[in-house]
Image: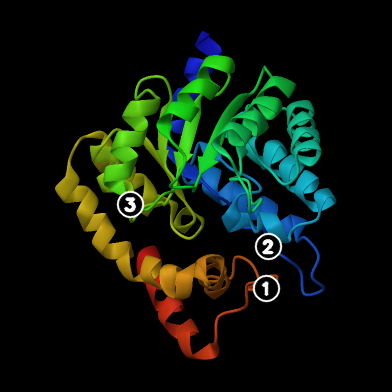
Amino acid sequence: MTMTFEHLKNALADVVAIPVTPFTAEGELDCEAHRALLRRLIDGGVRTLTPNGNTGEFYALTPEERSLVTELTIDAAGGNATVLVGVGHDLPTAVAAARHARTCGAQMLMVHQPVHPYVSEGGWVDYHRAIAEAVPELGVVPYIRNAQLSGVRLAELGDLCPNVVGVKYAVPDAARFAGFARDAGLDRFAWVAGLAEPYAPSYFASGATGFTSGLVNVCPSLSLEMLSALRAGDYAAAMKVWERIRRFEELRAADGSADNVTVVKEALASLGLCRRDIRPPSRELPESRRAEVAAIAAGWQA
């Protein structure tokens, strides 16, 4: 693996922010609010951004909107943050998005877990290999949500594609993660805890060096505080942060994570940073639950 790819692995050993995608009252992308939110993340110390992630409502955006989100994020990063662009859907669409990201100056791609109802392990390797080989200059990070996928298959992909530099692992099972990482090659890849702050301490104990975050949109300092504690091996301090964010993340996870993005946007709306608008199949938070989210967000800013 080249030094360039090692540098990208280092960028993944961090808080990997998944920015929201704000909308206007007319339902269009709110580019001005989006730029402001990205600047807030970067000014807050965030150094790795994932446009077109699930917290950015990837599956509710049109291809043209996903391209615009990519461009806005790379422009806002301005060399001050590494950009990890989310790509997915059918293979030609994913490859086209990967090439667009390369043209715009992205450094890495996060490949969404294929949503096809019939995914074979060999087909999973083929899908990711085709994307990785289309942009050999970019680092590639598979987003793994499939508990049935074996670490051996990831090792196979890594052998075929040296630019597969890291893994966003989002199976809610710390023991499975520990085995998967070791079967795939603990030192071969950068391991990102893909279920954010609630799972970060347990995944770090098993070899993760970074974690994703949607909460970071609301309070970057909290996410960075947890990262600092985990890097120092101070799990007691990390769990103190965990306790502060617990209720917020429980609200996001309720009802099968139906309000995962909704709660983040509600918190941002309560702070006057963007509208709460969200696209189907998600919905805005009911009036009865908005005050609790606003109180949590306000408490973090104090």
Q: Quadrant of residue 15?
A: top left
Q: Which residue is mark 2?
A: 22
Q: Residue 81: percent from the left, percent from the top?
A: 56, 33
Image position, residue 122 (x, y; %): 58, 32
SS under mark 3: loop
First in sequence, mark 1 or 3: give its number. 3
The residue closer to the viewer here, 102 or 147, is 147
Looking at the rendered structure, the kind of residue marked 3 is: Tyr
Q: Which mark is residue 199?
A: 3
| Residues at marks 1 and 3, CA–CA distance in whole angstroms | 28 Å
Element type where label 2 sits in the image? loop
Q: Position of residue 80 (x, y in %)?
A: 57, 31
State the residue in front, 1 or 171: 171
Q: Are marks 1 and 3 in contact (CB under 8 Å)?
A: no
The first of marks 2 and 1 along the sequence is 2
Q: On the rendered image, what quadrant is the C terminus found in?
A: bottom left
Residue at image coords 38%, 50%: 223
User: Which residue position holds label 1?
Assistant: 277
